[in-house]
Amino acid sequence: MTQTPDPILLLSGAGLPHWIWDQVRKELSASPTVVAERPRQAHASLTEYAAAALDSAPWDRFVVVAHSSGGTVAAEMVALAPDRVTALLAVTAVVPQPGRSFVTSMPFPRRLALSLAMRLAGTRPPDSAIRKGLAGRLDQETADRIVADFTAESAHLYRDKSEGTFPEHRGYLSTAQDAELPTGLQRRFAQNLTPAWNESISTGHLPMLEAPELLAQHIESFLAEAPISRAS
């Protein structure tokens, strides 16, 4: 009997549009995939982010691939619906310890700078910061699209505490050329996740745009090690 491919819910990092996953989804054509929605409320809580993501998944059980701040959302999703999330792959993701938030998971200087920036200017970074950090390794046209389509998030996404709950099968994929989330911080978040599967990819913070085929291959490698699940 042929095993049904695991369905995958893709969680984007803060502010990033759905289309960043388009090529990866084509590469993963054997597996059903959906990009998680965000809540519509301007001041949504972290729990509401997690609930919106869960509502996006048309399956009873599924794998979560969480990018960047999506790691915080994924932890809350597992706390809300532990029987639905069969596995979690964090891709250069912020993974807080239980009872900590995205902001309080950062080292002190970065934590202070992040809190101050959100208080003074909101959660959308300046265009120049997006180009230099998030989109620093992308071609001009793609970087322009990221800047144009980047949206502000609720401050609660960054400030609300996470339950820090994870499924048994979990992995961390780090990005070795990441100007947005340095490798030292990625190692810290990987330790918080305690993954059995831990690999690295030589890209910046957006591997789904810089190397979609390679990212898809790593996702498939992670799934190959996951316990067999029955998707609905």
Image (tube, helix red, strand yellow):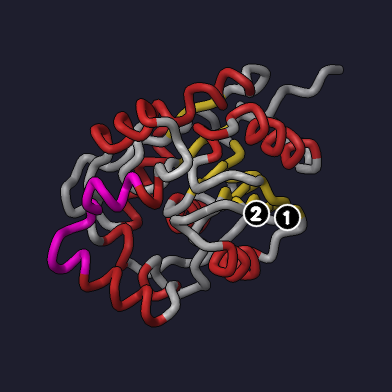
Quadrant of residue 103 within the rendered picture: bottom left
Asked if the magenta segment contains residue 120, the reply would be: yes
- Marks 1 and 2 sit apart, C-alpha to C-alpha, by 5 Å
Q: What residue sits 26% from the left and 72% below the top?
A: 115
Q: Amino acid at mark 2?
A: Tyr
* Label 1, residues with CA under 10 Å away: few <14, some 14-19, many ≥20: some
Q: Determine the residue positioned at 54% across, 34% down.
A: 210
Mark 2 residue crowding within 10 angstroms, few (<14) / some (14–19) / many (20+): many
Residue range corresponding to the magenta coloring: 117-131
The label shown at residue 198 is: 1
Residue 118 falls inside the magenta stretch: yes
Q: x, y percentage for residue 213? A: 64, 27
Q: Residue 116, percent across and down?
A: 21, 72
Rendered view: 129 above or below 186:
above
What residue is shown at x 70% (from left), y 59% (from top)? 195
Quick check: marks 1 and 2 in contact, CB under 8 Å? yes
